[in-house]
Structures are given as C-alpha cells and as structure tokens.
C-alpha cells in the first residue's frame, strides 16, 4: 500500500466520521453500536466493511431527513439488521466456525465415539 493510498484512506474515514457526527444523537448511538458489532463479527474484507458502514450512514441520513426515529429505520432488533446487511459476506464468525470444525475433525474417530 502506497503512502498516498493511506492518506486518501484517512481523508475518506475523517469525512465518514464527520457525516456520522452530523446525524441526530439517537442515530449516532445506534451507528456506534452497529460499528462495534460489525468490527467484531463483520466482513473480513476491509472494503466490504467500509461499504457497509457508508451505506448505513446513507440510510441514516435519509431516515433523519424524513423525520424518522432510528429504530424506525433499523427495526428494534439492531443485531438482526446488521446480520441481514452482511449475510452474503464472509465474516470473522465464519472463519472462527470453520477453524472449530477443522479442530473437531482432527480428533481421532475412537475419541469421538467415546463421547456418544
């Protein structure tokens, strides 16, 4: 990655953060919770995660402009809202589940049979 790319990325992120700060307070709170959630379980690809977060800000700006409360936009189950946004993306949760499956498959068959 070139230095110019890093600088551009920082500029884009700062502009993104400024958009979030311009949202009504309830939208900012929910956005921060969504961001935390997505950073924990969200898309593996950085560009995918950035696209999702930008899309959320777009959606929130529209909702706020229409005078809607944030939960009218996301629904009461914000985690389900997030899961729906990333349903077609490979997530950190997917990677973790795959690694557990690989570890379980390493257990010798005799040891697996004893647990039954």
Image: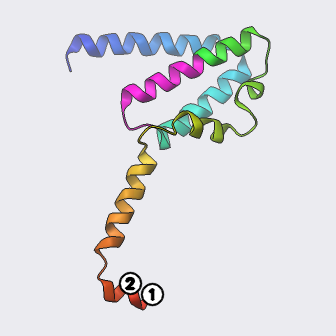
User: x and y percent of residue 9 in the render?
Assistant: 35, 15
Identified at 64% across, 41% down, the residue is 80
Q: Nearer the viewer, residue 52 or 29?
A: 52
52 w.r.t. 9: above or below: below
Q: Nearer the viewer, residue 39 or 14?
A: 39
Would you call the spot at circle 2 few (<14 residues within 10 Å), some (14-19), or many (20 or more)? few
Identified at 57% across, 11% down, the residue is 19
Looking at the image, residue 7 sits to the left or right of residue 61; the answer is left
Q: Give the image quarter of residue 79.
A: top right
Q: Give the image quarter of residue 109.
A: bottom left
Residue denoted by label 2? 112
User: x and y percent of residue 98 in the render?
Assistant: 37, 57
105 w.r.t. 49: above or below: below
Looking at the image, residue 31 sits to the left or right of residue 71; the answer is left
Looking at the image, residue 113 sits to the left or right of residue 71; the answer is left
Identified at 61% across, 34% down, the residue is 33
* Magenta-colored stretch includes residue 45: yes
Would you call the spot at circle 1 few (<14 residues within 10 Å), some (14-19), or many (20 or more)? few
Considering the image in quadrants, where does the N terminus appear? top left
Q: Looking at this view, name the residue that lies furthest to the left.
A: 2
- The kind of secondary structure element at disc 1 is loop
Q: Which residues are magenta?
A: 43-57
- The kind of secondary structure element at disc 2 is helix
Q: Give the image quarter of residue 77.
A: top right
**Measured Cα–Cα span from mark 1 to mark 2:** 6 Å
Q: Nearer the viewer, residue 10 or 51?
A: 51
* Magenta-colored stretch includes residue 53: yes
Please give the label number shown on residue 115.
1
User: x and y percent of residue 21 in the render?
Assistant: 61, 14
Label pair 1/2, CB-CB below 8 angstroms: yes
Identified at 76% across, 29% down, the residue is 71
């Amino acid at each position: 990655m070139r230095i110019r790319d890093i600088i551009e990325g920082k500029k884009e992120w700062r502009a993104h953060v400024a958009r979030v700060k311009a949202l009504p307070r309830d939208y900012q709170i929910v956005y921060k919770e969504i961001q935390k959630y997505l950073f924990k379980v969200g898309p593996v690809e950085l560009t995918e995660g950035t696209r999702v977060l930008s899309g959320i800000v777009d959606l929130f700006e529209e909702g706020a402009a229409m005078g809607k409360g944030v939960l009218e936009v996301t629904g009461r189950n914000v985690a389900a809202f997030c899961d729906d946004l990333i349903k077609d993306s490979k997530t950190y949760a997917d990677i973790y589940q795959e690694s557990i499956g690989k570890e379980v498959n390493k257990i010798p068959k005799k040891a697996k049979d004893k647990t039954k």
